Amino acid sequence: MAVELGPIRPRVKASLLWGVIGLLAFLVAVQGYELLTGYRYSLSVKAGVALAVGVGATGLSYVAEERLFG
């Protein structure tokens, strides 16, 4: 059963996508660091920081879009 939320504004959609990109980029960077150094972070640390980066990227891109593209 799918939930219909209605149309999403393009600005909100773009911000959410930038948040996902930020989250995934952070996880790739952490994995690369772990492969290079051999040090392993716990899954909870990775998930917590990745969530914070995703939320931060979403909020920042929402605010910055108005300032950059008016």
Image (cartoon, helix red, strand yellow):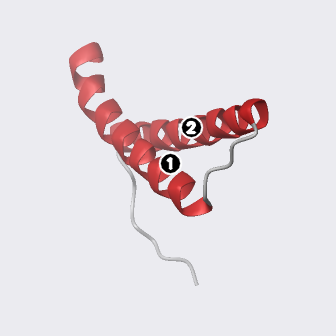
Q: Is the C terminus in the top left, top right, bottom left or bottom right quadrant?
A: top left
Q: Amino acid at mark 2?
A: Phe
Residue 65 visible in rendering: yes
Q: Quadrant of residue 34?
A: top right
The residue beneath circle 1 is 50
| Above or below for 25 versus 48 | above
- The residue that appears at 61% across and 58% down in the rendered structure is 42
| Above or below for 35 versus 43 | above
**Crowding near pointer 1: few (<14 within 10 Å), some, many (20+)?**
many
Q: Amino acid at mark 1?
A: Ala
Q: Is the N terminus in the top left, top right, bottom left or bottom right quadrant?
A: bottom right
The residue beneath circle 2 is 26
Residue 21: x percent and y percent? Answer: 55, 37
Residue 22: x percent and y percent? Answer: 51, 36
Q: Is residue 50 left or right of residue 5?
A: right
Question: Of residues 41 and 2, which is closer to you in this image?
Answer: 41
